[in-house]
Image (tube, helix red, strand yellow):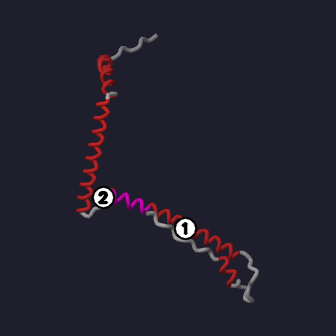
Amino acid sequence: MAEPPETPPWRQGFDALERQLSPRLEALVQSEQFAVAVGLAARVQRALQEQATNSTRRVLHGLNLPAGTDVARILNELGQLKRQVRELSTQLDDARAELQAARSAPTTATRASGRPEAASRKAAAPRKRRPARKAG
């Protein structure tokens, strides 16, 4: 049977240090002071981030360049337009299918020329739908 390999010296040192520090660090991170300090640090970080964002936006707009918020707004509008185009394409396909079905269906009222009467053509015409409302 092979003996387990000896633990390297660096690992022995790490384990000894961890045994000494773990209880102290655990007590520190569970203290109220630590929670308050982490909360304050998060608030300061958020404030600095907002300041940097606002400053960057002003500089970019001063150079007549779009900021990240401008790009996000345009991408949102583009997504809305794509949805509207998809809806309109579906409506157009439906209207074409209805028209094709109406043209290929035998009609009961025909003129002497063999063409359908105006009333039956109107009945086969697709309904007009309201345009999609703007999201606002």
Vertical order, 54 against 100 (above or below): above
Closer-to-camera residue (1/77)? 77
Residue at point 31%, 38% (across, down)? 39
Q: Position of residue 35 (x, y in %)?
A: 32, 33
Could you classify mark 2 by the number of other residues whose Cα lies within 10 Å: few (under 14), some (14-19), or many (20 or more)?
some
Above or below, comparing residue 9 to residue 72 in the picture: above
Residue for point 69% across, 83% down: 119
Query: Taking 91 as reference, is 121 left or right?
Result: right
The image shows residue 123 at horizontal and vertical percentages of 67, 78
**In this picture, is 22 found above or below 92?**
above
- Which residue type carries mark 1? Ser
The dot on residue 89 is 1
Does the magenta run of residues contain 63?
no
Label 1's element? helix
Q: Is residue 116 left or right of residue 80?
A: right
Rendering coords of residue 98 (x, y %): 65, 72
- What is the quadrant of residue 2 in the picture? top left
Q: Quadrant of the C terminus?
A: bottom left
Q: Earlier in the sequence, mark 2 or mark 1?
A: 2
Is residue 74 highlighted in magenta? Answer: yes
Q: Which residue is mark 2?
A: 67
> In the figure, is residue 108 to the left or right of 78?
right
Region rendered in magenta: 69-78
Label placed on residue 64:
none
> 90 and 59: which one is in front?
59
Q: How many marks?
A: 2
| Label 2, label 1: how far apart the Cα atoms are | 33 Å
The image quarter in which residue 128 lies: bottom right
Mark 1 crowd level (few <14, some 14–19, many ≥20, 10 Å Cα): few
Instruction: Report the residue at 35% width, 59% height from top.
Output: 71
- What amino acid is labelled 2 in the image? Ala
